[in-house]
Image (cartoon, helix red, strand yellow):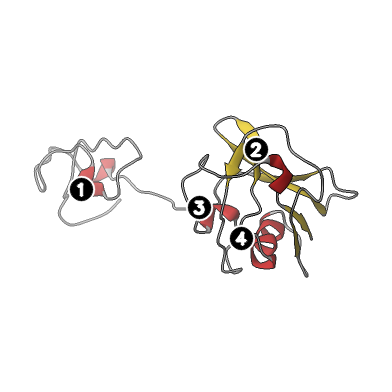
Amino acid sequence: QGSGPILLDEVECSGNELSLDQCKKSDWGQQNCDHIEDAGVSCDPFTGPPVRLVDGESTKEGRVEVFLNGQWGSVCDDGWTDRDAAVVCRQLGFSGTAKARAMAYFGEGHGPIHLDSVECSGTEHSLGQCVRPDTGIHSCWHSEDAGVIC
């Protein structure tokens, strides 16, 4: 339990707000509660969508696929670099050198192409933390599916 003034009551957020102030709530300082009702949050690092490697000769290589909107889809190789590959490998728990592969090196995918023009610095922990245009918008064919060797 906390102590001191209670600032908010009746807070309702949808999850799309950028700040607590954008949520539906009572006026600041207007409340009818006690510290027994104090709320808290626990923040975990954003990991983004799940990724997997498919059609490689081992679990450490393959075409990169991302799970979005209920289905697995590929990543286009536009701008795909070893830095991007390193992030995918790190997200999957692999360490060491990572190599990017382009032009459907591990074969063409069959589902949607979820990502294009991914830009990782190489220090991110997951592909979801990399700069990228809107998901699902691309100018690619499956002949440009990205892959990695971890």
Q: Circle 3: is it few (<14), some (14-19), or many (20+) Cα within 10 Å? A: few
Mark sitting earlier along the chain (2/3)? 3
**Residue denoted by label 3:** 46
Say which amino acid is labelled 4: Gly
Q: From the viewer's perspective, is the residue at label 1 or at label 4 nearer?
A: 4
Q: From the viewer's perspective, is the residue at label 4 or at label 3 nearer?
A: 4
Mark sitting earlier along the chain (1/4)? 1
Say which amino acid is labelled 1: Asp
- Which of 78/48 is in front? 78
- Which of 96/10 is in front? 96
Q: Residue furthest right?
A: 57
- Which of 91/33 is in front? 91
Say which amino acid is labelled 2: Gly
**Residue denoted by label 1:** 21
Q: Position of residue 102 (x, y in %)?
A: 74, 55
**Residue denoted by label 2:** 73
Can you say whether 111 is above or below 140 in the image?
above
Q: Is residue 9 left or right of residue 30?
A: right
